[in-house]
Amino acid sequence: MIPHLPMRPAWLCRNCAAPWPCGPAQLALVTEFYGHSIALAFYLAASMQEATDDMYGLGLRPDLAALHARFLGWLSRARRSHGR
């Protein structure tokens, strides 16, 4: 199985080319950080900041609300689905 990891500076999945974190990456992250949801949130926030910096470095103006939804917005749904 090929992991769903980010390809920088585009922040697309190396495996499926979807915006990272793609669905399979989200599932893998929830599994990897099981029981450590705050650590997962910090990891994703740091990744979001790196993605923002990379986009500015490419001369783009990132949509910060969209990046927040992409990197962190799914966390509350993931926590609810695991009964936390």
Image (cartoon, grey):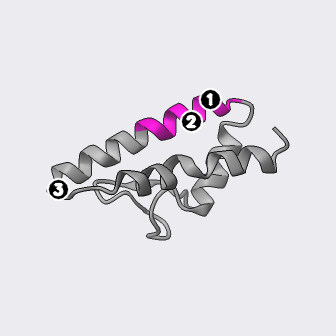
Task: Report the residue marked by disc 3.
Answer: 58
Task: Report the residue marked by disc 2.
Answer: 41
Task: Report the residue marked by disc 1.
Answer: 38
Mark pair 2, 1: CA separation: 5 Å
Element on which disc 2 rests: helix
Q: How many numbered badges does the structure rendering display? A: 3
Q: Position of residue 48 (x, y in %)?
A: 40, 44
Q: Where is residue 49 in the image (x, y as percent from the top left)?
A: 35, 40
Which circle's residue, 1 or 3, is located before the other in the chain? 1
Q: What residue type is labelled 2?
A: Ala
Callout 3 environment at 10 Å: few (<14), some (14 to 19), or many (20+)?
A: few
Mark pair 1, 3: CA separation: 30 Å
Q: Is residue 1 visible?
A: no
Q: Which amino acid does label 3 sit on?
A: Leu
Q: Residue at x 17, y 49 (%)?
A: 57
Q: Where is residue 68 in the image (x, y as percent from the top left)?
A: 46, 49
Element on which disc 1 rests: helix
Q: Residue 61 carries which label?
A: none
Q: Which residue is drawn at 70% across and 51% down?
A: 77
Q: Position of residue 41 (x, y in %)?
A: 56, 35
Residue stretch rendered in magenta on the structure? 36-46
Q: Which amino acid does label 1 sit on?
A: Ile
Labels 2 and 1 touching (C-beta < 8 A): yes
Mark pair 2, 3: CA separation: 26 Å
| Residue sitting at the far front | 65
Which part of the image, by quadrant, shows the N terminus? bottom right
